[in-house]
Amino acid sequence: MSNSSSITQFLLLAFADTQELQLLHFWLFLGIYLAAVLANGLTITAIACDHRLHTPMYFFLLNLSLLDLGCISTTVPKAMANSFWDTRAISYLGCAVQLFFFLFLFTAEYCLLTIMAYDRYIAICKPLHYWTLLGSRACVHMAAAAWGSAFLSSLLHTANTFSLPLCHGKAVDQFFCEIPQILKLSCPDSCLGEAGLLVASACLGLGCFVFIVVSYVHIFRCVLRIPSEQGRHKAFSTCLPHLILVSLFISTGLFAYLKPPSTSSPSLDLVVSFLYSVLPPAANPLIYSMRNQELRDAVKKMIPSLIPLQK
């Protein structure tokens, strides 16, 4: 039997058994990470520099890109380092920090997607009150509430999780540190407090999900009442990127945590964890830019200034 005071590091799950395959995973992760950093960085810069994009929708999209950038930077660089150096180790403190930031950014993103559903609801169903209900101060307060509530939740979860005594070794069955895998290592009957926090978080997550669903029920009703087909198409196009992001975010997360235990295996867990922790942050900028001409135009306008012409 061991406890947290005697454990100085954890062992993460490796992607492959051979050095050659580990290097292949390193280059794969490097390509995905650089693409995600570039795409989110361009989105952030374009929204910040183009005054035409200083609207509530793009303000929330800027926050989303910041969260995506932080989320993928929390897990992928460590996985790349472990693959390159053919190791599985992560320090006890490093594991706690990684879990905190991943949970913080993941929760904040979910809260922000809920706020973005409200933004689309006001834009479609109450357009005359859009700037009254979503002024600059209101947007800042809502974004701060998302970041602040996520920070408090992740702090409580991390402190409670790493205060539990550990009795089942130090091998984490995941390529990054997350709460379910740390709880598997804890002693029996010692995680009742964390179970209570998880139930409370699940209720909050369910409440956000219900809010998003109700918002889109009202949105679809309003869209169907628009007389012209062009107007309906335009209104739906403004909601489609957000709807895709929510579907991708929720579906991958639910599949990762609610899949039947009988189907669980280390290889499947790695693939599923990749889908919900790496795919959304990398795909979100692409999804939004594909359906948003204003954002594409701002990025195209900005790129020449970032690449000096060679004489």
Image (tube, helix red, strand yellow):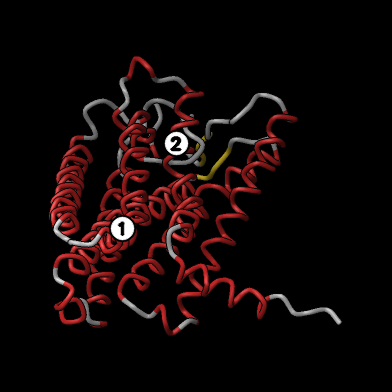
The x, y position of residue 241, in whole percent, is 37, 55
Q: Is residue 251 left or right of residue 38?
A: left
Helix, strand or loop under label 2: helix
Residue displayed at 40% across by 48% down? 99
Residue 1, relative to residue 87: is it above or below? above
At label 2, which amino acid type do we have? Answer: Ser
Mark 1, residue position: 233
Mark 2, residue position: 273
Residue displayed at 55% across by 68% down? 42
Pick the front one: 224 or 129: 224
Q: Is residue 51 left or right of residue 21?
A: left
Residue 74, relative to residue 252: is it above or below? below
Helix, strand or loop under label 1: helix
Residue displayed at 43% across by 64% down? 292
Residues under labels 2 and 1: Cα distance?
35 Å
Pick the front one: 58 or 168: 58
